[in-house]
Amino acid sequence: MKFFIDTANLDQIREAQNLGVLDGVTTNPSLMAKEGITGRENILKHYVAICDIVDGDVSAEVISTDFDGMIKEGKELAALHEQIVVKVPMIKEGVKAIKYFTDKGIRTNCTLVFSAGQALLAAKAGATYVSPFIGRLDDISTDGLNLIAETRLIYDNYGFETQILAASVRHTMHVLECAKIGSDVMTGPLSSIEGLLKHPLTDIGLEKFLADYKKGN
Ligand code: E4P
């Protein structure tokens, strides 16, 4: 499973990249705003700065909701850097835009996916990635991981090549469960990746090894 980090914070992206297990980055307008990145020119520059840090795909989201606007924006984003994947919302115009981008060889990430039907439609349109938001489903008492499992089943039934990108991952157990289900990618905060490191027996064992080494040296 590929690990993406879901942030526009350059320090966090650098830290994840330095860990050596990062495969890409996802951003969205809220994450850009959180970092104080505003204005079209600054936003575009920030995407390039992210691409310069990470070895992998970087999702950059369109703001338009009409077909022509999404196409114009998506082309501009895709031209920024070869690592850019155009993030398009799961709306009717978005599906048309994904199909258009697919035909033009521009890679896409279909975002704001909350049902298996939407995931099926994204794959039919040829999306490179589909992003089911598991954390936001959990937030409303709906099993987000079940959506990953349903999407996996549907895609495997028909051999769709669209990669399942489990999004809105909130914690380490989400990461583990996504891996068990067979999600192709997960995107979450750095803490959800670093949580995989932790085990008290590792800490206790290391402490003992170092103490024993000291005794003999
Ligand atoms: C997906 O690409 C989104 O950026 C993201 O995962 C949303 O996560 P949130 O629900 O934690 O905002």
Image (cartoon, grey):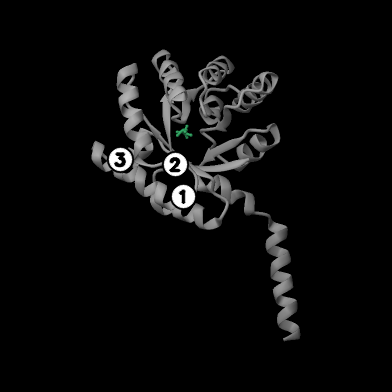
x and y percentages locating residue 62 in the rendered image: 35, 28
> What amino acid is found at the position of numbered circle 3 in the picture?
Leu
**Residue appearing at x 66%, y 38% in the figure:** 179
Compute the Cα span from label 3 to label 1: 16 Å
x and y percentages locating residue 176 in the rendered image: 66, 40
Which secondary structure lies at badge 1?
Answer: loop
> What amino acid is found at the position of numbered circle 1 in the picture?
Val
Assess whether mark 3 and mark 2 are in contact (beta carbons under 8 angstroms).
no
Name the quadrant containing residue 79. top left
**Which residue is under mark 1?**
54
Disc number for residue 83: 2
Compute the Cα span from label 2 to label 3: 13 Å
User: Mark 2 or 1 closer to N-term?
Assistant: 1
Disc number for residue 160: none
**Residue appearing at x 57%, y 47% in the figure:** 193
Q: Nearer the viewer, mark 2 or mark 3?
A: 2
**Residue appearing at x 38%, y 35% in the figure:** 78
Which secondary structure lies at badge 2?
Answer: loop
User: Mark 3 or 1 closer to N-term?
Assistant: 3
Name the quadrant containing residue 170. top right
**Residue appearing at x 65%, y 19% in the figure:** 154
**Which residue is under mark 3?**
44
x and y percentages locating residue 105 in the rendered image: 46, 29
User: Mark 2 or 3 closer to N-term?
Assistant: 3
> What amino acid is found at the position of numbered circle 2 in the picture?
Gln
Assess whether mark 1 and mark 3 are in contact (beta carbons under 8 angstroms).
no
Label 3 Cα neighbours within 10 Å, binned few <14 / some 14-19 / many ≥20: some
Label 2 Cα neighbours within 10 Å, binned few <14 / some 14-19 / many ≥20: many
Compute the Cα span from label 2 to label 1: 9 Å
User: In the figure, 181 relative to 42: above or below?
Assistant: above
Task: Name the one closer to the observer, 96 or 171.
Answer: 96
